Every structure is written in structure tokens, then in C-alpha cells.
Image: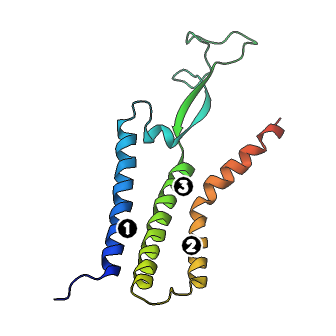
Amino acid sequence: MSSLGFAEILVAVVAAAVLVSMMLCYRSLQEARDWSLTDALSEDVTLTRTDQAGNPVDALGGALPAGQLPLNVTVMKASSSRFIALVGTVAILMLYVGFGLACLYRFASGNDIPDMTKGANFFYSGLVLFAPYLINKFSSAFSIFKP
């Protein structure tokens, strides 16, 4: 049985540091009273308040008099684009850490770092996970032109 070399110890230390830092982030977010993942993955949506039949109502829940505008309520609703962006971020983070540890091990073992030009295309394709979020943000920038 061979003893651990410098490369193995270095990779283990870096991997442990990544795990500890992620756990510290998780712990600090868990202790925060005014922050929640549910709120972070939600966005404000303005809805018209309605009765059970789907008719708009006034502030007291009664029928609207003629000419009165319906009551609009802003609520937090889950956002699929934000959830996809979170999943994409975690996946890309794991890929970067994994490839980084592999390159670090190879470099610390005395070998050359491999040519990552083809690997770059792999990482660029991972950015597609952020497309719904980016399109949503891009389209909201033009909301000032809506009638």
C-alpha cells in the first residue's frame, strides 16, 4: 500500500475547503431570519383579486361598482426560470470543481495541464441552462414599451 503523495493531499485539502465553504454558506443562510430559498426562487406577480366565480372584486370582497378598477394584489409566485438557473449554477459549479480538482491533481503530480479548448465548449453548452432566466430578464427590460 503506497502512502499519499503531495498531489493527493493537495486535492483532498482543496475539496475539503470547497465543502466546508459551501456548508458555511448553507449554515449562515439557514440562520438568517429574513431570508428563505422559497422567497429567493420566487418573483412578484400582480394578480387581480377575484371571488370564487372569477369575477373581480373590490377591497372588501364585494362586487365592483360600474367604472371602478378591480383590486390588484402583488404576491410571490414560484419562478421556474429562477429554479432552472439555480440547478444550472449548482451543476456548473460541480463541473468546474471536478475538472479543477482533476487538473490540479495532474499538475501537482508533475504532468502538464491538459488542453481544455474542447472542454471549454462543454462548459459553454452548460450556459444553456440559464437561457430561460436570461430571456425572462431581457424581455422584462423592454416592458416599458408595453401599452
Residue wearing tag 1 = 14
Pick the residue in front: 100 or 145. Answer: 100
Mark 1 packing: few (<14 Cα in 10 Å), some, or many (20+)? Answer: some
Residue wearing tag 3 = 85
Q: Find out whether the residues at labels 2 and 1 contact each other: C-beta distance under 8 Å.
A: no
Residue farthest to the left?
A: 1
Q: Amino acid at mark 1?
A: Val
Q: Which mark is residue 123?
A: 2
Residue 86 in the image, given as x and y percentages of width and height: 50, 54
- Residue at image location 35% in from the left, 59% down from the top: 19
* Mark 2–mark 3 distance (CA, rounded to whole Å): 15 Å
- Quadrant that contains the C terminus: top right
Q: Secondary structure at mark 3?
A: helix
Q: Secondary structure at mark 1?
A: helix
* Mark 3–mark 1 distance (CA, rounded to whole Å): 26 Å
The number of discs equals: 3
Residue 96 in the image, given as x and y percentages of width and height: 48, 69
Residue 124 in the image: above or below residue 29: below
Disc 2 versus disc 1: nearer the observer: 1
Residue 34 in the image: above or below residue 23: above
